[in-house]
Amino acid sequence: MTLKMLRGGLAVGFMALILVIVAACGSDDPTPTPAQAPTATAVPDAAPTATSPPAGSTTTPPRPTVAPPTATPQPTATPDTSATDFFEGKTLRIYVPFDPGGGFDLYSRTVGKYLGDYLPISRTVVANRSGAGGMTLANELFNRIEPDGLTFAMLSGNLITRQMVEDPAVRYDFQEFGWLGAVTSRFYTCFVSSRIGINTFEELINAPEPVFFGTSPANRYALDLLKAGFGANIEVVAGYGGGSAETLVVLEQGEIDGDCNDWSVVASRRPAWLTSGEVVPLIQTTPNIHNDLLPGMRNLNDVKDMFVRPELYPVFEAVSLQDVFQYGFTAPPGVEPGVLEVLRAGWWNVVNDERFIADMAAVARPVTPVRPELVLDSVVTSLTLDAQTYKLLREYIN
């Protein structure tokens, strides 16, 4: 799929439907549709401590990465000295696709806090550029922001779905971005209230009475796929436009029986649930990756043989691959390769820095860094599906 194909456009009616999908789907950041003027904040460099790595170092031992099983992590190339000198005394700018205060904002500002320990920059400025569920920033990063090596952004991985269905509003190609990596993956997990007495995924599928799951109208396709693919006895209640914040509340109130959500969001908003037994996690729909918060939890690939409609498995897998790079960082296309490698190395060392990890743990945000080549591997897989899978994908998103 090429950018030219994307710009071919679809019918106006289909455009109106798809425009709302990402704004309500997959992000824990409530995002208004209208674009707003950037809100810029300078992030001072962290003061080095006795255990801080030296400025410019690229030798911090990497933490385990999260990746599709077909990809093999490779070490980041050692940047050349001239490319490193390019950053001397300059200002880096990080754009965030949602308003201040959410997960994307926290990750971006904390990355900016430590970049000066690994790149010889003078400062980092973080600016919020919200609009259209993150599409405003993605389109601008691809087409308007100068690929000067001094600007990068955090993008929501679920924006790739809009490229997959050829949304005419898309003006970007995920395959052409200069990916730095992803700070973590999204561990999308389906769980139920303990009051209904269901303790396994098999019990959910074979429940004698319907189990009511809540979701936003735009995100119901994921639950529709779950119901159709496994023959699960669930009913989808798709009236919760407030997203995860609303569905967690109505689950507590007994209005619904279950929810599917990023488990790190559950951990940050309802930390007591991790140990109280108030909810029972049943299955992680993100394929091929494992969440330290739920050791031993089966994922989509582990229950592949339970699909009653096997033709839907590649559709479910395709829409779930975006979870691998949901919290991705990227530069615009066209950054000089040597400069991009320096930027990648600095970013990679930040997200593996124990201070960064501790800061994010303090706000219940996971850090499981994903290498840029593994992000690109997932992107390419998502955008090279066979015709039948694309057909089914569009049917369920409709």
Image: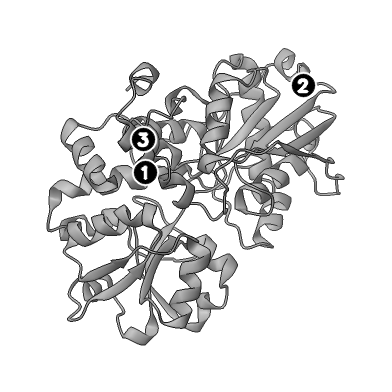
> Label 3, on which residue?
15
* In the foreground, 392 or 238: 238
Mark 2–mark 3 CB contact (< 8 Å): no
Q: Quarter of the image for the N terminus: give it.
A: top left
Above or below, comparing residue 228 to residue 6 in the picture: below
Residue 385 in view, yes or no: yes
Q: Earlier in the sequence, mark 2 or mark 3?
A: 3
Picture quadrant of residue 258: bottom left
Cα gap from disc 3 to disc 1, whole angstroms: 23 Å
Q: Nearer the viewer, mark 2 or mark 3?
A: 3
SS category of the residue bearing label 2: loop
Q: Position of residue 58 (x, y in %)?
A: 69, 32
- Residue bearing mark 1: 321
Q: Disc 3 or disc 1, which is closer to the eye?
A: 3
Q: Earlier along the polypeptide chain: callout 2 or callout 1?
A: 2
* Helix, strand or loop for disc 3: helix
Residue type marked 3: Met
